[in-house]
Image: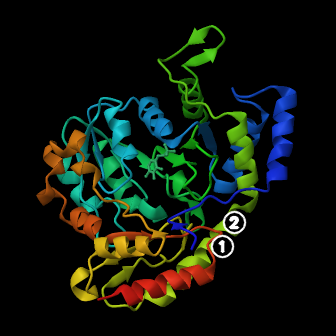
Amino acid sequence: MKNIYVTQPSMPPLEEFTAYLKDIWESKWLTNNGKFHQELESALAGYLGVKYISLFSNGTLALITALQTLRITGEVITTPFSFVATTHSLWWNGIKPVFVDIGNEYFNIDPKKIEAVITPHTTAIMPVHVYGNPCDMQAIEKIADTYGLRVIYDAAHAFGVTVKGNSVMNMGDLSVLSFHATKVFTTIEGGAIISHDENTKKRIDFLKNFGFADEVTVVAPGINAKMNEIQAAFGLLQLKTVDEAIAKRQKIAQTYREQLGNCPGIRCLWDIKQVRHNYAYFPVLIDSEMYGSTRDEIYEDLKKHHIFCRRYFYPLISNFPTYSGLDSAAVENLPVATQVAGKVLCLPIYPDLELESVEKIARLILTLQK
Ligand SMILES: *Cc1c(COP(=O)(O)O)cnc(C)c1O
């Protein structure tokens, strides 16, 4: 039997990609704001419904650069329930992460717990739209406005997600995307920063290119985080089919929900009203008492059947040695995140996954029940 992994990229037709490669071979323009880079920036701004976008070689460098863009220092309030790059981007800027617990509904940072940890050193909040489910952005904005804080969203999971037709990326000061191969929209490796005014977009573009404003002027200690033409070409092809890909993901999510939604001990996350979801992940929470087996038992059993789920996000970022010594990393401070990290299992979801396989995975989970 073939292995089924938690995700798999949807590949564009090879001939279409080689046509782009031919063009690149002829022009010999490989990177530095080439024509496919420019084309992808404007196509993505249009697709996402945002004003300014700057492409990056990956999402982590985009996060690091977003913090540099706004000159964030001191302490930043963030969530432990995310991919480790969220907090690493703070560390790389010499910023102290301050972890706040998550809410129990969609596992995003709990705005009710933010105010209590603000100090004179706090300069920003870095929330994550986990699994692509939007944060409580109004509550976060209210706190940020009251205390004069910046908001940088890690929107790595939220490609194409809208609330009442408005992109989640229009909220906060900046939003950061990842186009890694495991994400809904990919450029192999890649990322982007969404900004809301021309000057900020300019500063981001200087920073990702060593700080060069022109041939002889360096305005900041920038980095090299530019997306190249081959990545951009791959992205242009991805964009053609991304709506179709999201529609297929939706069908898979629907199938899982039909099969597992009423099973005692298994909790699915449901769609939110007026949100356009992207179905980037399909997390379920396993309550071992009600279900009979633990999350880890199911995870291991499924592996024996060639199904490779992932326990996103276990362990919590706050449990990794770099961060576990921080006061805010204490388990007592993070009861909900700790509980969710112990129960969550992300099931396979990607456009080419057959619905029959989805049904089989769901049935298997039901029969593995002790
Ligand atoms: C994937 C991801 C990143 C990192 O993006 P890369 O493009 O892999 O560097 C950051 N934050 C979150 C939440 C992610 O899922």
- Numbered label attached to residue 243: 2
Quote the CA–CA distance across marks 2 and 1.
6 Å
Amino acid, disc 2: Asp
Residue 210, image x, y percentages: 55, 19
Residue 315 horizontal side relative to residue 23, left or right: left
The answer to whether the residue labelled 2 contacts the one labelled 1, judged by CB atoms less than 8 Å apart, is yes
In the rendered image, which quarter is residue 369 located in? bottom left
Q: Is residue 34 above or below residue 18?
A: above
Residue 133, image x, y percentages: 45, 65
Q: Residue at x 34, y 48 (%)?
A: 144
Residue 129 horizontal side relative to residue 116, left or right: right
Q: Is residue 58 above or below residue 357?
A: above
Residue 45 horizontal side relative to residue 62, left or right: right
Residue 134 seen by the camera? no
Q: Residue at x 17, y 52 (%)?
A: 116
Amino acid, disc 1: Ala
Residue 199, image x, y percentages: 57, 30
Placement of the C terminus among the 4 image quadrants? bottom left
Among all residues in the image, which is located at the extreme top? 216
Q: Which residue is mark 1?
A: 247
Q: Residue at x 65, y 69 (%)?
A: 352
Q: Secondary structure at mark 1?
A: helix
Circle 2 Cα neighbour tier, 10 Å, few/some/many (<14 / 14–19 / ≥20): some
In the rendered image, which quarter is residue 367 located in? bottom left
Placement of the N terminus among the 4 image quadrants? bottom right
